[in-house]
Image (cartoon, grey):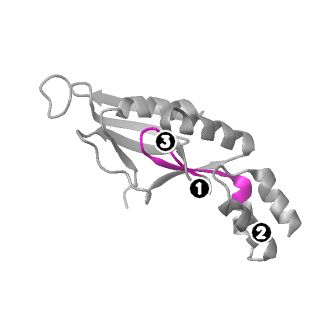
């Protein structure tokens, strides 16, 4: 089987988005940003194709006149080491028009959905179901940005 690569489409702001996303992760890099010249089928300067990596995950992208609708059925999931990483990414991704949603999800200013999840939540969710796990889930369901301290409090209080 060939490798599966997420392919993102933008409405003229692809290069800006890719540069922004790559600024968020230490091991990110842009492989190529090829732009249309004059006389192309879309606005001059729009991305013909792009290839980049975020934390080792390869992505491809392009600009499409008018764009395609971005649905919440697809999101970019980030397993964060700790609360500091959650806070940093949450602040950057919700800045300049990003929208906080629920349970660790947000939509960035380019319209893409992200899940910014602390690894502590991953650990809690891997546990067998119990009243303590239910308390953690109930606490998470009330949050926008996930707060490890509040998950720990819920776990200990159950």
The residue at the point 42 percent across, 34 percent down is 17
Q: Is residue 31 left or right of residue 121?
A: left
Pointer 3 and pointer 2: residues touching (CB < 8 Å)? no
> Position of 135 compared to 85: left or right?
right
The residue to which callout 1 is attached is: 102
Q: Quick one: 60 or 151, which is closer to the camera?
A: 151
Q: Is residue 76 above or below residue 26?
A: below
Q: Quadrant of residue 14?
A: top left
Camera sees residue 110? yes
- Position in image of residue 37 (x %, y %): 19, 23
> Which of the marked residues, 3 or 2, is nearer the chain's N terminus?
3
Marks 1/2 in contact by CB < 8 Å: the verdict is no
SS at badge 2: helix
From the image, tell me which residue sits under label 3: 108
Residue at 62%, 36% in the rendered image? 91
The label number, if any, that marks residue 135 in the structure image? 2
Mark 1 closeness class: few <14, some 14–19, many ≥20 residues within 10 Å: some
The residue range painted magenta reads 105-121
Q: CA distance from mark 1 to mark 2?
A: 17 Å
Locate residue 20 relative to residue 142 in the image: left or right.
left
Q: On the image, which quarter does residue 39 sit in? A: top left
Magenta segment includes 135: no
The residue lying toward the viewer, choosing from 96 and 126, is 96
SS under mark 1: loop
Q: Residue at x 37, y 30 (%)?
A: 15
Q: CA distance from mark 1 to mark 3?
A: 13 Å
Q: Residue at x 61, y 53 (%)?
A: 104
The mark that comes first in sequence, 1 or 2, is: 1
Q: For marks 1 and 3, give the one nearer the viewer.
A: 1
């Amino acid at each position: 089987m060939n490798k599966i690569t997420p392919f993102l489409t933008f409405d003229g702001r692809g290069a800006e988005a890719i540069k922004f996303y790559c600024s968020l992760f230490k091991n990110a890099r842009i492989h190529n940003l090829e732009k249309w010249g004059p006389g192309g089928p879309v606005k001059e300067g729009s991305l013909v194709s792009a290839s980049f990596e975020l934390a080792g995950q390869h992505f491809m992208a392009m600009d499409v006149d008018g764009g395609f609708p971005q649905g919440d059925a697809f999101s970019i999931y980030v397993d964060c080491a700790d609360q500091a990483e959650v806070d940093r990414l949450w602040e950057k991704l919700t800045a300049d028009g990003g929208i906080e949603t629920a349970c660790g999800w947000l939509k960035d200013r380019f319209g893409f959905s992200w899940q910014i999840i602390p690894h502590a939540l991953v650990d809690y969710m891997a546990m067998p179901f119990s009243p303590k796990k239910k308390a953690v889930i109930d606490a998470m369901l009330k949050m926008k940005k996930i707060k490890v301290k509040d998950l720990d409090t819920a776990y200990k209080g159950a």
